[in-house]
Amino acid sequence: MIIDYVRNRQQKLINLSSIGTIELGRAILAGAAVLLTLLVLMPAAMGATRSTASEADLVRLSEILGAVHHIREVCNANEGQLWRGKMQELLKLEAPDAALKELLIARFNRAYHQYRLAYTRCTGQARTDATRLLDEGAALTERLAARIRG
């Protein structure tokens, strides 16, 4: 069902004026569901050595979570600490070594602060960026999950 959503999402754009409404809420939940799918699959791969590509994807996913955390906050999505919580889940389930964990946290925080400087209020561009980032995050989680599945 999530795969069908992602495919349909690529073919049909969400009306960006509806941020915070049910339609965008569904998009957010679908993105979160894809992320949760990845997080459920991660423990199976914890014993395996990570590839450089996987680490790069995890770093980018951390940046996306940080950016989305700020944008959704400034656009009054009323999600509280949802995206910070997703980052904490990712760290817990991925169990990276100390250096990678530090890098993931730093990239989450850097993206959060960069977007905080860029968007002090909710704008059309902020909404566009949120949608773009959620789509990219969904694609990343799907790619990471595919690597884990083999």
Image (cartoon, rainbow, N blue to C red):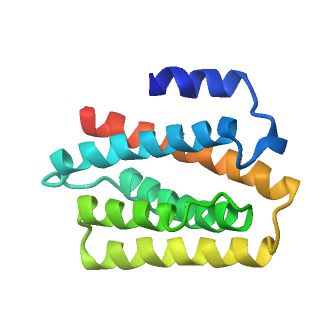
Q: Residue 21: where, in percent of width, then height? A: 71, 43
Q: In which quadrant of the rendered image does the N terminus lie?
A: top left
Task: Say whether residue 85 is left or right of residue 123.
Answer: left
Q: In which quadrant of the rendered image does the C terminus lie?
A: top left
Task: Say whether residue 38 is left or right of residue 115.
Answer: left
Residue shown at 43% from the left, 37% from the top: 142
Occupied quadrant, residue 80: bottom right
Task: Say whether residue 43 is left or right of residue 31.
Answer: left
Occupied quadrant, residue 10: top right
- How many tags in the picture? 0
Q: Residue 101: where, in percent of width, then height? A: 34, 74
Q: Residue 110: where, in percent of width, then height? A: 59, 77
Q: Residue 19: where, in percent of width, then height? A: 75, 47
Residue shown at 64% from the left, 27% from the top: 9
Residue shown at 84% from the left, 55% from the top: 125
In the image, residue 111 sits, relative to residue 75, either above or below, namely: below
User: Toward the viewer: 125 or 94?
Assistant: 125
Residue shown at 65% from the left, 79% from the top: 113
